[in-house]
């Protein structure tokens, strides 16, 4: 009664199983981060994809075993076998996608899914409704059930593992997992085919509603189309998630700029300066790195604001910022500390390369004007670690007023008792 398997249909059954497994894995991983109506949609989609895929693979595999008579199936039993696979898949995915999952629940999920596959498989075979009862081979029957349980457990474990994977690694892992799952599903099916054999001469019932010719390639094509739609949904979803991640990253950068950047000049603001100092100090617990802070304050800011409109004054601030940036070498760091003040951070402040910079800063009163009025400056400076070993003490020490002519002369930096720690000394 049985002839050789149709290689094209065997291959088609495996392809359907791979597509179903891959898509179901993706739907299953999405369940872990979905809530409310989104979770219900992903759960329904995952159950339909996995259940329908396994069911389709089964009937395509059935057609791969040509019979001496035309194959046909009972409509109701065939529909119930599909429903069993879908419901079992849905229950299993719902359990496996929980935030916390112990061994008992995992076992329930694996057995539920395996039970659905076994019921689907053997009910689907009984759906042929032959004139003679099938003969069951106990050894192959037990083996097929064991394969179903192991395959279901492996599939759900993989689905659980993949939920924390992202990017290209997740794609390759899902593809590899889908190939393994498909091999297990096909192994269970073809083992089950050996476990249930109809006697020679048995013929299908005349009232079977589904003819076998629709259960092979046509069903495989229909299933592949369904899975293709599901794959398109996953691709679109991946694109949307990546776009959302990019938008979130851009928003995070924007918020960071707002928090640590001055909106008028684009320079780091007070918070940005303090964070930079904290980062530097955290990397130098032994106080071996040396740098200086130079505090530059527009002494006649109020006079200028009384003479200029708000927009004009903002333009003055931007021009001052641009000029200071042009003065500074690449290693320097400039921040707008307040409405009136800027702070320069100079690593290795004794370097000869800074000589020209110090000369220009000492002549600031002669360099900048606003509405015909010269901008006058107050200056101060501090040195790490001599005048302070914390960001607050360094900034406070730099705010102590000095003559512009003192900028860059660090050999006469005096330590104020109000801003220093015990044991700190004057820099010599």
Image (cartoon, rainbow, N blue to C red):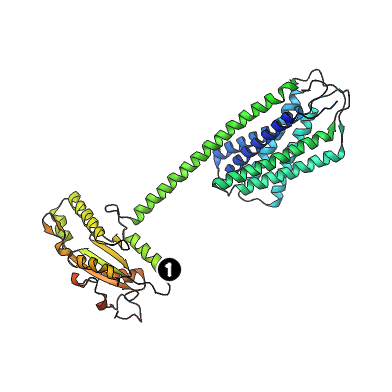
Residue at 88% x, 23% y is 201
Q: Nearer the viewer, residue 27 or 360?
A: 360
**The N terminus, quarter of image:** top right
Q: Is residue 83 visible?
A: no
Which residue does the image show at 40% across and 47% down from the upper left? Answer: 251
Q: Which residue is mark 1?
A: 283
Residue at 33% x, 71% y: name it.
393
Q: Quadrant of the C terminus?
A: bottom left
Looking at the image, can residue 320 be seen? yes
Q: Secondary structure at mark 1?
A: loop
Where is residue 65 drawn, in percent x and y?
Answer: 79, 28
Q: Quadrant of residue 172?
A: top right
Where residue 309 appears, as percent x and y from the top left, is 16, 50
| Lateral position of residue 340 relative to residue 59, left or right | left
Q: Residues within 10 Å of mark 1 (few under 14, many from 20)?
A: few
Tell me what residue is drawn at x 74 percent, y 25 percent. 76
Camera-nearest residue between 401 and 216: 216
């Amino acid at each position: 009664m049985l002839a050789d398997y149709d290689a094209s249909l065997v291959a088609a059954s495996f392809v359907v199983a791979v597509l179903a497994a891959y898509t179901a894995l993706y739907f299953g991983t999405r369940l872990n981060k979905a809530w409310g109506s989104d979770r219900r949609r992903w759960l329904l989609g995952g159950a339909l994809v996995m259940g329908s895929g396994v069911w389709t693979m089964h009937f395509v595999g059935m057609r791969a075993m040509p019979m001496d008579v035309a194959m046909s199936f009972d409509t109701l039993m065939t529909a119930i076998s599909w429903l069993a696979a879908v419901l079992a898949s849905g229950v299993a995915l719902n359990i496996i996608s929980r935030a916390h999952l112990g061994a008992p629940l995992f076992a329930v999920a694996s057995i539920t899914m395996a039970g659905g596959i076994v019921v689907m498989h053997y009910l689907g075979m009984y759906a042929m409704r032959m004139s003679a009862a099938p003969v069951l081979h106990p050894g192959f029957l037990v083996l097929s059930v064991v394969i179903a349980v192991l395959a279901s457990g492996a599939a759900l474990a993989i689905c659980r593992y993949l939920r924390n994977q992202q990017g290209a690694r997740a794609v390759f892992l899902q593809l590899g997992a889908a190939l393994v799952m498909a091999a297990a599903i096909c192994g269970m099916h073809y083992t089950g085919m050996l476990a249930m054999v109809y006697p020679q001469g048995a013929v299908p019932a005349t009232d079977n509603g589904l003819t076998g010719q629709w259960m092979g390639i046509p069903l495989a094509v229909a299933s592949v189309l369904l899975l293709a739609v599901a794959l398109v949904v996953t691709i679109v979803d991946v694109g949307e998630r990546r776009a959302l991640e990019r938008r979130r990253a851009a928003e995070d950068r924007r918020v960071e700029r707002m928090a640590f950047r001055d909106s008028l000049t684009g320079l780091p603001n007070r918070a940005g300066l303090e964070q930079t100092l904290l980062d530097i100090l955290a990397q130098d617990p032994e106080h071996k790195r040396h740098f200086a802070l130079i505090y530059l304050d527009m002494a006649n800011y109020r006079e200028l604001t009384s003479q200029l409109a708000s927009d004009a004054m903002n333009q003055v601030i931007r021009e001052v910022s641009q000029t200071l940036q042009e003065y500074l070498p690449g290693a320097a760091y400039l921040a707008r500390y307040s409405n009136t003040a800027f702070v320069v951070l100079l690593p290795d402040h004794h370097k000869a390369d800074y000589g020209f910079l110090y000369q220009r800063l000492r002549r600031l009163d002669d360099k900048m004007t606003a509405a015909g009025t010269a901008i006058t400056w107050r200056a101060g400076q501090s040195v790490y670690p001599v005048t302070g070993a914390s960001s607050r003490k360094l900034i406070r020490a730099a705010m102590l007023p000095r003559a512009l002519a003192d900028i860059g002369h660090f050999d006469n930096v005096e330590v104020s008792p109000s801003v220093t720690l015990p044991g700190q000394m004057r820099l010599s």
